[in-house]
Image (tube, helix red, strand yellow):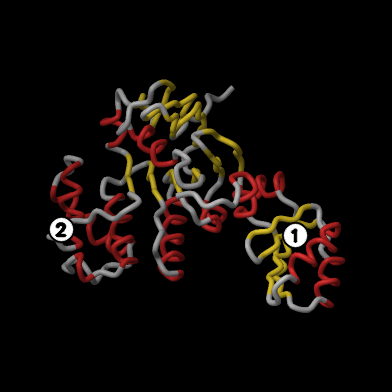
Amino acid sequence: MAAAEPLALAAADLRKTYAGNQVVAGLSFAVRPGTCFGLLGPNGAGKTTTLRLCLGLTTPDSGAITLNGCAIPADGQTARARVGVVPQFDNLDPDFSCAENLLVFGRYFGLPERQIRARIPQLLDFASLGSKADARIATLSGGMKRRLTLARALVNDPDIVFLDEPTTGLDPQARHLIWDRLKQLKAAGKTLILTTHFMDEAERLCDTLIVIDHGRKIAEGSPRALIAEHIEAQVVEVFEESRGQLEIFVKNQKQLAERVETSGETAFFYCRDPRPLLARLAEAEGLRYVHRASNLEDVFIKLTGRELRD
């Protein structure tokens, strides 16, 4: 029998408490090499703390972590030599040009300067910044800064790349470019560990993911498997245009859906067969609607709730 393939990252029963609050509460998961693994959850769910635990930047109260074959945090420095990190907020050095940012960062890994300089044009081209080598950080757009941060994370040619909300604040064009580059990295055999609040991003990129809330894992699987497991196949979103009409419509037609949720002036009808509901909506006045297939955001909302998290 062939030996089992080593895992890129494994966590077993992780726990971390701050000021009496258990931020990570018995979290376990495993990541296969060459895949994209998603870590999803509302604000305050424990995602960033989990990443810090996995990188050896925070010591767990209990539990075990293996990153790239190294025990964490004991061998954290060795493991991080083969890891790249794209932080949630850009921390590029404004005093340096794009190329200088890559050069200085490469020195942190003890790489020979000749090797770093040889990689810089390739990294800038990968980030679509080939013409910006000498540009100062202050002259870059938000999308350019984000792409440079991604290029910087690759300066040591890592096996594993951690990405903490890599496309937050970007316009659609910049998001799609980042997605394309992440797909290229995965195709090249890199392992991606991704946190995001964009469910379409997770659905596009992740092979497997976990949803956590209050530090606990509440779901795990591929995006399509989670959608099939937790949500009806079709969703009809109904919006109110005339005050009071939505409440009346929901009361009279809720039997046409398996489940109905109302949030503000929108009702979500979760259906296996939406045709009877759509027929009623075609005759209704004072309402607009959108009919779509269910998606990962529906799963996320069902599992974590619609209330605002700050």
Give the amino acid at mark 1.
Phe
Q: Which residue is mark 1?
A: 269
Relative side of 296 to 70, left or right: right
Q: Residue at x 39, y 55 (%)?
A: 166
What crowding class fits label 1: few (fewer than 14 Cα within 10 Å), some (14-19), or many (20 or more)?
A: many
Q: Residue at x 73, y 75 (%)?
A: 287
Give the amino acid at mark 2.
Glu
Q: Is residue 173 above or below residue 193?
A: below
Q: Which residue is mark 2?
A: 100
Residue 146 image point, x, y percent: 32, 60
* Among the 4 quarters of the image, the one containing residue 135: bottom left
Residue 23 image point, x, y percent: 44, 33
Residue 106 image point, x, y percent: 20, 47
Quarter in which the N terminus is drawn: top right
The residue positioned farthest toward the front in the image shown = 244
Relative side of 244 to 296, left or right: right
Q: Residue at x 37, y 25 (%)?
A: 60
The answer to whether the residues at label 1 and label 2 have Cβ atoms under 8 Å apart is no
Q: Residue at x 32, y 66 (%)?
A: 142
Q: Is residue 235 above or below residue 279?
A: above
What crowding class fits label 2: few (fewer than 14 Cα within 10 Å), some (14-19), or many (20 or more)?
A: some
Q: Nearer the viewer, residue 118 or 310?
A: 310
Q: Is residue 129 above or below residue 242?
A: above
